[in-house]
Structure formats: structure tokens, C-alpha cells
């Protein structure tokens, strides 16, 4: 009982700290603010790292105390355990070996994934994961189809547009950018076909793109319909 | 009976007036028309405000007459009560303290929300709100996921693109614009990644964007399927 | 029996002629082809008009012969009757009064609607119209919501962006273009907000745009689920 | 039994080879890599063609051995048989008659379709094809509707925009590019209407585009809901 209460308090405090960390991260990205208050941002980071490190150690210890060695190992390799570790790793790595600053910052992004913990106790998350998990195979297959279509489109557009626009469709690797942006129907407009063949192909791919969007939507719909059906049955019996 | 008939007449008149107000608003936004007929637009506004104010007072009075003090309070804080108040507020505020013209005009936009009253008696609206309400938690969770993904994408693209395009991805706050436009698959093309890392990340985010669109669609589908199922059961029994 | 066979032959011939008309229309739009073969296109048009006029008269006559005066009136005001009339009207109008060439060409577009007749006997079309008809109210309401959101967005963005981009957001009427293109997630990129307020508003509207797409999709899904359910029940009993 | 084992081994080896072929194709598209290692790419291609040719002959032979002449004919004209043939055809064609290099490369793309063979034994593919097959008519009809709408939009925008932008909307054929990109909600922004009439029409088409996306999604949803329902029934009995 006491442990539960303590955990709830820790959680609440950690949530607030995560919120502040995200806010600090956004504010720090403004040059003017970074220059004026850089020191405070650094101090806040030190403080946050200290807290998150303590939290991590506490969670390992608690798992050990409760379920023994296996419990702590289980926590370490659990979804949230990995996130807890990744979110403090970059700081310590930076102390040992000087890693590239930009890479470090990208690593720090992992801290953001902590926000997912907000939903840990929500029933919505459970319905979501259950619904999406039940169509796991179909969604994986859709992803596989999407990647295949992107690869195919990128190769085709490369052969069709390379001569006309050698700078924009310089290689298949480069063309993947166009293919993804087109199939996801984003269409920034930085690259687009200009030859007749390229336009015809891109038109067909645009229509295929509708299907690429429609299939996962259909699968997810069906999953939620089934989920709601099960809930109805459960409520009746 | 009489009150009902009177209310229906008031409603009809108010609806026409709202329609005329929207039309006037659109017409007034044209410089040439504003300059030529500015006076008439102002007079029409005065007339409209007078009518809407009377309507507001009448509705409070009617609620008081019918359900006493509690009834009128209930109306004032109801959805339509607040809209009725907000739609006339800016005019009076402007008489008391000279508020910034542009802000005033934004406030006047709230008048547009009155159009929602058209659906007050429609059964479609009821089916809609019932269906969407039944998946309220799921939709809120989807919104939460979307905001999280936007924040994460904005942070990541900032670190990846800042050095290459310091003017377009000047801060995480600025990058949120890119992230939202990309995830909603709008893609204006005013900002887009140009580095390899940025493009890879944006490609992944584009595919995630499909999911961000697919999940609410799936949830809403399921809600309507359930709604239609219930109607069928009801009709049978 | 004979009439049926004759009708089938007429239909087949008319279908081919429609196909040739569409092809001719596309080919004629190329300046080089129009200049080289303009005469042949005109002759083909004269021939087509003659056939379509005869078909129209025949159908009226046949309806009269079968169901009397009421039958022919019914045909004239039926969906396909109106299309039959509209598709030949521009030519005759042009002989009587010289109407503006561009307007005339737009009128000629109505001929294209004839292609819908292809599906007259298909069961797919029946399933489609039945499914979509069953959610007619919901779809109308969605359209109403979309138009409302477009109007609201256009008004808001006008007030937010007018001072910064007076040429692009010159009036609410002009802003409707931006609002529609954004909500439908097309995003050409010819107009987009550049002020902070405009960007924040456009971000919110982009997310709303997802809903604007999700709701009709959900409604249509539910309609088809119900349709398939009914077919299953029918097959069983 | 032995044949099955052998086939599994062949399949595994072929899969790896396909993967390597796709990788080589992507790498070869980089000018620098092509210039440095062009010879190795060519040798690898020769090797691949040899293997794929042997595989093709083996499969024909095996089908003959198992089911006689009819069996081998059946394989040759099966989906995977055609793909097997197409993927080696360009190489041999090139030896006989010197065909245009670019066309050759496009033909080579067909090799990519082999990746579909990965899913041959997956149950996901079966659920997919069964679900999509059950709504085959509806999807075909949707495609027919889409093509019709594209043709109609292209014709209309051509008449509306030709005078204002004769270079971008030079013919209906050219306008089809705009129509497809707009209806699929991609919107690159290389072509967009600038006249009032064109904008109004494009706005309406944008909203229609939502429907064009919504209908196939709804149909596919319904198909998957039905598929899951059937699975549930099967599991029960």
C-alpha cells in the first residue's frame, strides 16, 4: 500500500519533470534564450539527470526487492526500462568519451518517449494496443507493401526522370525521398516529375497512394469494430 | 404552444440574420466594397448587434420565467449561451475600452459558431455527437498521440536540419510548423528537409503520418458501425 | 424482346460514340492537332450531335409509346434524361444565339457525365448508391460541417495574415481557396501563412482537416459494413 | 518430401539473390559507385541472370514432371510464372536486338515484383487477397469513378485555365497531371489554378477528392470487418 502511494508520488513528480524537460528543450532551441539563460538550462539538465538516474536505480532496486534478480533483469529489458536507460545514457556517454554534439542531442530525444508513460494506466491505451495488436500481422504486411511500393516507385522514377533532372533524381536513394513523400500524399513540391513518362507513372502511383492509405485504415477500422463488439458481448454476459 | 411558435419564428429570423452577417463579413473583407459601402456595413452591424443582444436578454428572461434563477444560469453557461454572449461581447468591449482592431475582428469570428445552432434539432447531429462521444477517450488519446508525435518530430528535425537551414528550422517552436503540416499530409512545401538525415527522418514520419490519419478514421468508423447496429436492434424490438 | 435487343444495340453504339467523343475532346485540346485536323473534329462533332439528338428524340418517343405522355415527361426530367438534353443543348444554343466560346465549352463538359450511364445495369452501382443513400443525412451533415469549417478558417486566416500578405489573403473570398486546399490536405504551397498567429491557426486547422477526412470515411465504412451484413442475412434466409 | 526441401532451399537462395539484386540496383544508380565498380555490377548481373534462368527452366520442368504438359503451361501463364519470365526477358532481348537502354532498365524493374513471392506462404497475404477480392467489384467501380472524375476535372480545368496559363494547362492531356495530383491530395504545387473560376472548381474538386479517398477506404474497411467476422465464426464452430 505504502509502496503504491510512494510510486504514485514519484510518478507525479517525474511527469512534471518530464513536462519541464520538454519545455526547457523547446525554449533552449531558441538562440536568444540559449545565449541569455544557457547556464540555467545546464543546471536544470544536471538536476534532471540526477533525478532520472536515481529513479532508474530505485526502479531496479524495487524490482529486485520484489521479484529478485530475475525481476530487475526483466525491468531493465522491459519497454519502459529501456526508455529509462536511454534517456540518461547520452549524458554519461558524453562524460566518458566526447561524442559529437549533434548526435548527442538526437540521443536526448529519447527522453521524449517517456511521455508514453503517461498512458500506462489509461484504459484507452489498453484498448488501443489490444486492437492494434490483433491486426499486427496485417499492419506489418501493409508496411511491407508500402516499403516495396516505395522501392519500386523510386527505381522507376529514377530511370524515367534521371536524364531530365539529374540533380533531383540523382540516384535511386535520392528518389526514395520523392516516392515516400508522394505515396504518403504529402507532396512538398521540391521534387516532382517533369517528363511525360514520369508524370504518367507518378499519376498511377498517386492513385496507388490512396490504396496505401486506405488499407491500413481499413484494417484498423476492422480491429476497432471487433474490439467494440467484444466489449458489448462482455457487458451483456 | 405559443412560445414554441414564437421561438420557431425567432429562430428562423435569427438564422437569416446570421446568414446575412456571414455574407456581410465576407463582402466587407474586399477593400473596394468596404470603401464604397463601409457605412452600410456599419449600420447593418449596429442593427445585428441590437437584435442579437435582444435575443440574448430574451433567452435569459425566458429561461428565468420557465425554470427560475437556476434555469437562466444554466442557459448562460450552456454551449449555446456562451456562443450567444461571445458573439456580441466584442462590440460592447470596443465601446468601453478601445481594444486592438485586429483582435476585435478575431473575436467577431465567434459569431460564426452560431451556425452550429442550425443543427440543434437535426437528428444527424444527435447521431454524430452520440457516435463521436462513445469513442471520446480513444479520440482524445489519438490527439494526445498526434501532439506527442508532432513534438518529437519537431525536436528531431530541428537537430537534423538546423545547421543546413538555420532560417527555416530556427528553433523547435518553428519546426512544429513543419511537423504539423507534414503529419497532416498537407505539405505546402515552404519548409522541407534537405540533409540526408532530415530526409530519412521525414520519410519515416510521412509513413507515421498515414497511421496518424488511419487511427482516428478507424475509431470513428467503429463508432458509426456500432451506432448503426444499435439503430437496427432498436427498430427490430 | 425486340425492343430490348434494339436498345442494347443502341446502347453499345452510343457507348462507343461517347468514348470517341471523349477521345476527340482530349485530342482537340492539343493546339497542333486542332490546327491540323480542326475540320475533321468539327465534322465528327456534327455527326455526334445528330446521333445524340436522334437518340434523345427516340427515347422520348419510346417512353410515350410505352407509358404515354406521363412516361415521356418522366424520362425528360429523369437523371439520364436531363443529361441527354444537356449534352446536346450547347450546340443548338450556339446556333440560335452566339454564346461565349469558353462558356460553350464548359457546357460541353456535361457530355462527359454520360459515362455514368455505363454503370446503369451494374450491380456495383446499386450497392454503392444504396450504401451511400443510407447515410445520406450523415454525409450531408459532414459536407455542411466542412463548408462551415472552411468559412471559419478563411475568415480567421484573413484577419491573421492580411497585414503580412495583403496580396495573397486579400479578402475572405480569396482566403477560402487556402482554407479548402488546406483542409482537403492538398496543400499546393501557393498560399500559406507566414505570421506566428497564422501558423498556429493553420496547424490546428491541419489537425481538424484530419477529422474532416476521417468522419466521411467512417460514415461510408459503416454504410458498407451494414450493406455487406444485409447481403449475408439475405443469402442465409 | 525431398522436392519440398529442395524447393525451400531454392526459395531461400532466390530470396537472398533478389535482395542482393535490389541492393545492387540501388547502389548502381549512384554515378560514383557505377564508375568505380561498374564491372562487378555487370558480373553480378550475369550471375543473377544465369541463376534466374535456371530457376525458370527448373520450374517449367518440375511442373511438367508433376502435372504433364498442361502443368507447365499453367505455370508459364500463372502470376509468378509471368514474373519469372519478365525478370529475365530484358537481358536476352538486349542480346538479340539492341533495345534502347532506358527502356531496358525500366523492363528490369519487373524483377522487383519478385519480392511479392516472399508473401506466397504468409497467411496475411491470404487474408488480404481474400478480403480485397470480396470487394473486387466495388474497388473496380471506385477506380472507374476516380478515372472518370480525373478526366472530367482535367477537361474542366483546361477550359478554365488555358487562357491564363497556356504553358501549364496546354491541353487536357497535360491537365490530367494536375487533376490526378489534386484528387489524390498530393498537391506538389507545380501547377495550380490562378483564375477565379479555376479556383472555385479546384475547391470543389478538393472536397470531391476527400470522397474519392473515403470510398475505397470504407469499402476496404467493410471487407476486413467481414473477414474478421468470418474468422470468429469459424473459431467458434
Image (cartoon, coloured by chain):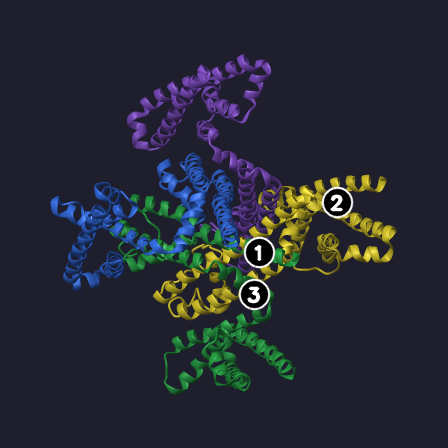
Chain colours: A green, B yellow, C purple, D blue
Separation (CA) of disc 3 from disc 2: 55 Å
Q: Secondary structure at mark 1?
A: helix
Whether labels 3 and 1 share one chain: no
Task: Rate crowding at label 3 as few (under 14), some (14 to 19) or many (20 or more) other CA atoms within 10 Å.
Answer: few
From the image, tell me which residue sits under label 3: A126
From the image, tell me which residue sits under label 2: B47
Residue B190 is at least partly visible in this image: no
From the image, tell me which residue sits under label 1: C160
Chain for disc number 3: A
Task: Please say if the residues under marks 3 and 2 sit with CB atoms less than 8 Å apart.
Answer: no
Q: Residue sitting at 12 percent across and 48 percent down? A: D95
Horizontal side of residue A36 vs B13, given as left or right:
left
Whether labels 3 and 2 share one chain: no
Separation (CA) of disc 2 from disc 1: 26 Å
Where is A10 relative to D235, above or below?
below
Q: Secondary structure at mark 3?
A: helix
Q: Position of residue A79 (x, y in %)?
A: 48, 73
Quarter of the view holding residue C44:
top left
Horizontal side of residue C75 vs A97, given as left or right:
right
Most distant residue in the left direction: D96
Amino acid at each position: 500500500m505504502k509502496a503504491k502511494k510512494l510510486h504514485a508520488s514519484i510518478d507525479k513528480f517525474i511527469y512534471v519533470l518530464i513536462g519541464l524537460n520538454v519545455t526547457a528543450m523547446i525554449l533552449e532551441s531558441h538562440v536568444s534564450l540559449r545565449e541569455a539563460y544557457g547556464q540555467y538550462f545546464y543546471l536544470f539538465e544536471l538536476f534532471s539527470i540526477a533525478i532520472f538516474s536515481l529513479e532508474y536505480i530505485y526502479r531496479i532496486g524495487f524490482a529486485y526487492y520484489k521479484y529478485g534478480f530475475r525481476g530487475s533483469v526483466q525491468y531493465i529489458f522491459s519497454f519502459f526500462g529501456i526508455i529509462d536507460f536511454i534517456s540518461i545514457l547520452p549524458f554519461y556517454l558524453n562524460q566518458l568519451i566526447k561524442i559529437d554534439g549533434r548526435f548527442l542531442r538526437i540521443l536526448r530525444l529519447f527522453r521524449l518517449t517517456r511521455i508514453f508513460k503517461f498512458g500506462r494506466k489509461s484504459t484507452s491505451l489498453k484498448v488501443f494496443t489490444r486492437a492494434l495488436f490483433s491486426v499486427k500481422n496485417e499492419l506489418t504486411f501493409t508496411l511491407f507493401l508500402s516499403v516495396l511500393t516505395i522501392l519500386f516507385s523510386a527505381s522507376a522514377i529514377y530511370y524515367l526522370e534521371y536524364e531530365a533532372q539529374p540533380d533531383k533524381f540523382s540516384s535511386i536513394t535520392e528518389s526514395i525521398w520523392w516516392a515516400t513523400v508522394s505515396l504518403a500524399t504529402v507532396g512538398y513540391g521540391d521534387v516532382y516529375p517533369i517528363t511525360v513518362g514520369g508524370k504518367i507513372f507518378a499519376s498511377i502511383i498517386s492513385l496507388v497512394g490512396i490504396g496505401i492509405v486506405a488499407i491500413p485504415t481499413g484494417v484498423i477500422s476492422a480491429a476497432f469494430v471487433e474490439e467494440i463488439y467484444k466489449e458489448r458481448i462482455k457487458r451483456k454476459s
